[in-house]
Image: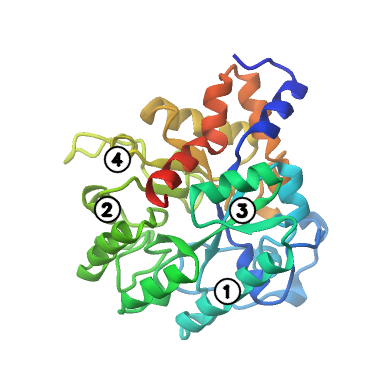
Amino acid sequence: MAEHSPRAALELHRRAIVIDGHSDILSAVADGRVRLKERVTVEPPETWQGAAYVRVPAHGTPYSPSPYSVWFECIGQYDIPRFQEGGVTAEVMAIFVDEANRHRPLERALDMVAAFHREIESNPETLLLATTAADIRRAKAEGKTALLLSFEGGEPLGWDLNLLDIFYRLGLRMISLTHSRRNALADGTQLGIQTGGLTYLGRDLIRRMNELGMVIDLAHLSDAGVWEVLELSQAPVIFSHTTVSGAPGYKTGLAEPDPRRGRSKLHALAENGGVACVIFVEQPDVRAIVDDIETVIQHAGDDHVGLGSDFVSLAHAPKGLEDISRLPAVTEEMVRRGYSDETILKVLGGNLLRVFGEVLG
């Protein structure tokens, strides 16, 4: 059992391979609003006067971010100094095409790929590109943070799966088929709208990702789509950021048995060998995050849970875990609850590393 003390928890955290399954900071980087080398401090939500900054709300999404969140996004929650302070071995950097770029998804994705590689090339002493599990282990050995490139929504591919092979050569290693909208691949979690599953193209994408060795991400995919992927995929899959607590805007029903299938998505995910990464955004505090971790463990076992922060702004951050530098708080809370070192190491990154090893090589 882990020794119950803050010092022991920090020592455990520092020797762990820590992997965060989802960050959206690449959008702000691609826009030129921030560089990862800089430790940025933004105005706290309680003091911000946002009337001059209000923009037209996004359409086509069930979420309603505050003006503060729309303006600052997750700036001040992810950067190299915070990666180092939080002991982050690997960070998954998402390419998400927002509403402002829906008319040019391919160009926007390429802009973000370019920004991704520029950051790594500009910071060789602290960052490295991850396309395999070995790269993540090397980052740990060298005291760096490995960055892994992902799609959050397949809009950049359009109807042409040849682009998948091209993005693979540019370093892409993970894809969630949808966000909160319907696209050429599948239906997303459009709250309040009747959704379907995968299209023929979406099914072809799953097969090709298995062939290439790419991680399939079920985050934001409709219920029907989740079950289809779990049936189709020949490799473990993940939820890069999800919840079982029903945080606003993130209803998943992961732990609820499906009467037609006689099991829950978490049970099916465990049978697949996959991992559900617990989300931080909209959680009230660190204890709630560990409650979610406990629920996943109860339903799927400790081999199938990880971390997927998905910070969207300080206005929606949990108390005690306001940015990625505060990750040791999760370890401390798990130690306090009496979890073994082995289980904690799995949750912090060991489980995702296993999946990355099986899928990416």
Task: Find the distance from the CA under tag 4 to the CA under tag 1.
Answer: 31 Å
Tag shown at residue 33: none
Residue at the disc numbered 4: 272
- Helix, strand, or loop for circle 1? helix
Frontmost residue, 124 versus 100: 124
Under mark 4, the amino acid is Asn
Q: Earlier in the sequence, mark 4 or mark 1?
A: 1
State the image coordinates of residue 202 (x, y, percent, origin top left). Answer: 27, 66
Residue 345's place in the image compared with 99, above or below, is above
Q: Nearer the viewer, mark 3 or mark 2?
A: 3
Under mark 1, the amino acid is Met
Left or right, 49 with respect to 357, comes to right
Residue at the disc numbered 3: 146
Q: Earlier in the sequence, mark 4 or mark 3?
A: 3
Label 3: few (<14), some (14–19) or many (≥20) C-alpha neighbours in 10 Å: many
Residue at the disc numbered 2: 229
State the image coordinates of residue 96 (x, y, percent, origin top left). Answer: 51, 68
Residue at the disc numbered 1: 112
Q: Earlier in the sequence, mark 3 or mark 1?
A: 1
> Residue at image x 42%, y 41%?
275
Left or right, 333 with respect to 356, comes to right
